[in-house]
Image (cartoon, rainbow, N blue to C red):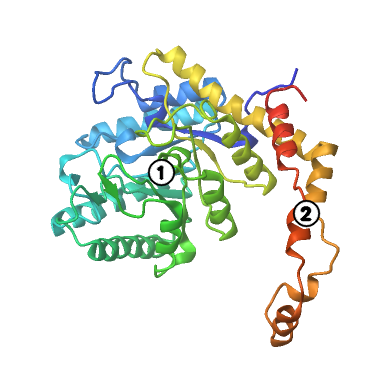
Amino acid sequence: MTDYSPKPEHRFTFGLWTVGNPGGDPFGYATREHKTPAELVYLLGEVGAYGVNFHDNDLLPIDASPAEVEAIKKEFSKALADTGLVVPMATTDLFHEPIFKDGAFTSNDPKVRAYAIQKTLKAIDLGVEFGAKTYVFWGGREGTETDSSKSAIEAIKRNREAMNFFCEYALDKKYDLKFALEAKPNEPRGDIYNPTTGHMLAFIATLDHPEMVGVNPEVAHEHMAGINFMHGVAQAWEAGKLFHIDLNDQYPGRYDQDLRFGSRDIKAAFYLVKFLEDVKYDGSRHFDAHAYRTEDFNGVKDFARGCMRTYLILKEKAAQFNADKEIQALLAEINADDGAMTPFLGKYSPEKASALKAESFDRAAISKRGLKYERLDQLTIDILTGTR
């Protein structure tokens, strides 16, 4: 039997907010007790995770006294040392506090925008203090319920101004840090600015230091909008902008469910894992999900183990797909190229364009060719169901 035990080289990480989720929702109170950041680190150490990530206030309560801050940091540091876990990523909570009810960086109130930048600067320092190399920005409140309330153009400019500020700050401090922007179409706002990974990639190109900024795509956020997540990840990778990734699962068209990775759409999860492994993505595999509300903390451990186990199973299935002789023969046939079109394709030249315009194509003959995608897809299903 294959060993699906997680190892450090798999780079599996969880946020304090994921395994620490108390099970509350808008219609019900928490079903699990609060655990300290250190206790959650020990839990992750027990299940075999590689690292732990945090929002500033996951680790340090927003109104903690200086003495409380030092005590929490000391306890957290000891837990990291005891378990060997690392902190690859950090982020800022810019959505819980009432002050952010109309956004943080895009708020119409300049005092809110200034406070959001101040809070983020301190949170960046905190992340770097614990070794984070990636800093994620999720603008959960950066949006509107009514477009009467805010200029979309001004929101873009305010977002850009904030990101340029943070890039300059990191450069000034000589931090070894890169930034990753996380898209989401809606919730908690009615509409959130830069709702997809593609929007974020376009926005990054307008920054003063685009080389410092990439994306952090999340499965659930793209599936909420009915988008093929792997395609967005591929676009980010091809652009050199896949700086981090959030793994979970989601039914399309619903609220943000943050389901255990691979628990809803195993086929989509397979294609994602196959892509990440094929391109040799070497960043963290971060599980931004949480256990069902029905679970106690033993169930939370089952949830965390399940996320990692499913990834490793799908990694094995991807290797099986790549080694399957019939599948590879089909792919070779599908992508066959006898070189006849080489003179017409590739980089433009006037001669190439003239030759291509003069070429005759037998549309009927070309159209008659069957592509065997049905067979290919069924072979994929056979692999996923363990019948091949």
The residue positioned 43% from the left and 63% from the top of the image is 202
Farthest-out residue, bottom: 350
User: Is residue 166 something one can see in this rendering?
Assistant: yes
The residue positioned 26% from the left and 51% from the top of the image is 142
Query: Whole-percent x and y of residue 365?
Result: 78, 59
- Identify the residue under disc 1: 225
Identify the image quadrant of residue 289. Answer: top left
How many C-alpha atoms fall within 10 Å of the one at disc 1: few (<14), some, or many (≥20)? some
Label 2 SS: loop
Tag 2: amino acid: Asn
Q: Is residue 122 left or right of residue 221?
A: left
Nearest the eye: 334 or 305: 334
User: Is residue 175 something one can see in this rendering?
Assistant: no
**Alpha-carbon span between mark 1 and mark 2:** 31 Å
First-in-chain label (1 vs 2): 1
Which corner quadrant holds the N terminus? top right
Identify the image quadrant of residue 256. Answer: top left
**What numbered label is drawn on residue 335?**
2
Label 1 SS: loop
Which corner quadrant holds the C terminus? top right
